[in-house]
Amino acid sequence: LVLTGTKKGCDQGQCGACTVHIDGRRVVSCLTPAVQVAGQDVMTIEGVAAPDGTLHPLQQAFVDCDALQCGYCTPGQVMSGLACLAEGHTGTDSDIREYMSGNLCRCGAYVGITAAIRRVADQTQQTEV
């Protein structure tokens, strides 16, 4: 399928590198047999940007907030960040950290990741007012 963005991490559902969305819910794909999702909507990191290549606001915030270093965990972090935003778990930075805790970053870019999610949450709240 040439979908190389989703990364294989621990193969035990503990690192979040393989996070995808299935019918709008975040799941770790390493523990999800393909046959189990037949007929469901599966979105990987490749489906996040606009068809013309314009980055999603969260992807852009990851760049702007330096929320990545080696980049290996970034696809899973973005997918979980999108779910965190959609689920409304962005009230405080502590909430963001709690709901992102299933995604590990060996480089320690957590401050930037939290800042990126906070930025998009704040922008979303401003446009809703």
Image (cartoon, helix red, strand yellow):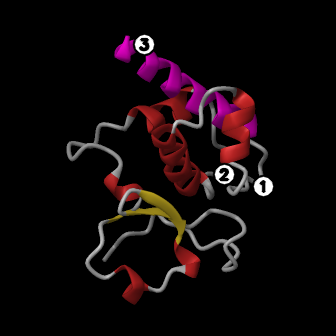
* Real-space CA distance between mark 2 and mark 3, rounded to the nearest whole angstrom: 32 Å
Q: Nearer the viewer, mark 1 or mark 2?
A: 1
Category of crowding for the residue at label 2, using alpha-carbon neighbours closer than 10 angstroms: few (below 14), some (14–19), many (at least 20) = few
* Residue count near mark 1 (Cα–Cα under 10 Å), binned few <14, some 14–19, many ≥20: few
Q: CA distance from mark 1 to mark 2?
A: 9 Å
Q: Which residue is mark 1?
A: 106
Vertical order, 58 against 36 (above or below): above
Q: Are marks 1 and 2 in contact (CB under 8 Å)?
A: yes
Q: Which mark is residue 126?
A: 3
The first of marks 3 and 1 along the sequence is 1
Q: Which mark is residue 70?
A: 2
Sequence-first tag of 2 and 3: 2
Q: Is residue 122 magenta?
A: yes
Question: Who's the residue at 48% across and 44% down the image?
Answer: 82
The amino acid pointed to by label 2 is Cys
Residue 13 vertical position relative to residue 34 in the rendered view, above or below:
above
Indicate the position of residue 105 as horizontal and vertical percent values.
73, 53
**What quarter of the picture does the N terminus occupy?**
bottom left
Q: Hey, which quadrant is residue 8 in on the image?
A: bottom right
Q: Which mark is residue 23?
A: none
Q: Residue lying furthest bottom in this view?
A: 35
> Image height check: is 55 above or below 10?
above
Q: Which amino acid does the dot numbered 3 rest on? A: Gln
Determine crowd level at label 3: few under 14, some 14-19, many 20+ residues with C-alpha closer than 10 A: few
Instruction: Name which quarter of the figure residue 119 lies in.
Output: top right
* Residue 30 in view, yes or no: yes
Q: Secondary structure at mark 1?
A: loop
Q: Main secondary structure of the magenta part?
A: helix
Q: Which residues are magenta?
A: 110-129
The picture places residue 50, in percent across and down from the top left corner, at 26, 43
